[in-house]
Amino acid sequence: MERERTSKTEISSICSSEPSTLCDMLRLTTPSKPEESDIGIFLTPPVRGGNTAEKGDEWAATDTPTVISGHDRSNIEVCRKPLGRFLSFDVKRSLFSSKRLADAHEDTPGSKRLRETAVALSNVTLDNVETPSGRGDEIKSVVNTLSTDPEVVADGSRPYTIPTVHGKHKDLKAISPDTMDAVLRGCYDDEIGRMTVIDCRYPYEFKGGYIRGAVNLFTRDMVRDFLLSHMNDDATSGRHVLVFHCEFSSERGPKMYRHLRSEDRGLHTDVYPRLAFPEVYLLEGGYKAFFHKHMVQCKPQQYMPMLHKDHVTDLRHFRAKSKSWTAGERVNRLRTSLRF
């Protein structure tokens, strides 16, 4: 009984003390300013009781953080959401779906032309080459012209001379069989200095009939050797125009066209945008379309298809060769070059 009286007396003395003292004894103290490196503040669950949700209630759906009443409200904030919910949808998408976002942009011929021009410009190092003042501004002007005006030749020096048509290959300039015939008849002699027709078909196809004055270049090495042997033609004999084609101008002709442009760019990297052959065309429809409309311009006046029954062995031979040439393209793909 005496012990109970003593406990009651102690409790009474505590209760009679100042309220602030009692609150200070029972209050859970927190630091006045959390450390910036302490990630625990972001992982702290919402405070229960007081003005917040009652015990057993779900966390509030609002994004506004709850401020603990009492000590230094301006500095101590406890978020209602776990750390994963702090990342917005855009942030998560940028972290985990950057490749998809990059692929979402449409690769139009115009954007491809601009992108490849920028890549070629980045490969031009003016620091290692003695260039006159204003050279950088000149290159920027040419790049801007090439990226905005599709009707200028690949070095930006002049417009295309021969009328073009919309072909199957959007990145290549194409001419119709009728325009090809007009060029052969001399209708554009006052505007071009020289024209070479490059036939990319296999030799047995070429012997079976070809466009008058054409040369048969059906390998990548042949195209490169042709380029090296005519490096200075533009300076000595005026404009040298090239026209590529194969049987249908769907695969072999366009491939050799792009290969020549790639090699031409590579040989003139230090003097960009200079090219040996800035004006190059693709004969739309190939030899077949031209032969059926302008047979008189062919020599001999015949048409040998690639799948001719008398040349099955030759076809196998040249197809096997072409596969080995194509395998070498993987290494060359690492080289950045312009293809327009």
Image (spheres, grey):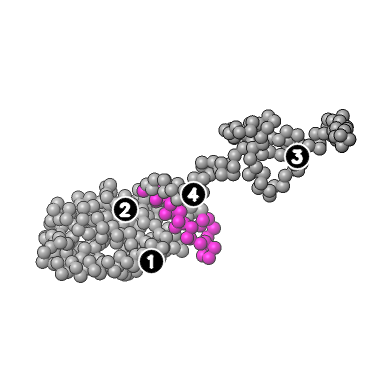
Q: Residue shown at 38%/48% (left/top)? A: 107
Which secondary structure lies at badge 4?
A: helix
Which secondary structure lies at badge 1?
A: helix
Residue 25 screen position, x and y as percent: 81, 37
Is residue 121 found inside the magenta-colored segment of the image?
yes
Is 9 placed above or below 111 here?
above
At label 3, which amino acid type do we have? Answer: Leu
Q: In the visual, does 53 lie left or right of 255?
A: right
At label 1, which amino acid type do we have? Answer: Val
Report the front residue among 181 and 123: 123
Q: Which mark is residue 28?
A: 3
Q: Give the alpha-carbon distance from disc 1 to disc 2, as whole Å.
A: 23 Å
Q: Give the alpha-carbon distance from disc 1 to disc 3, as whole Å.
A: 69 Å
Labels 4 and 1 touching (C-beta < 8 A): no
Q: Which mark is residue 96?
A: 4
- Category of crowding for the residue at label 2, using alpha-carbon neighbours closer than 10 angstroms: few (below 14), some (14–19), many (at least 20): some
At label 2, which amino acid type do we have? Answer: Leu
N-term-proximal mark, 3 vs 4: 3
N-term-proximal mark, 1 vs 3: 3
Q: Give the alpha-carbon distance from disc 3 to disc 4, as whole Å.
A: 41 Å
Q: Which residues are magenta?
A: 109-136
Which one is closest to the eye, mark 4 or mark 1?
4
Report the front residue among 69 and 12: 12
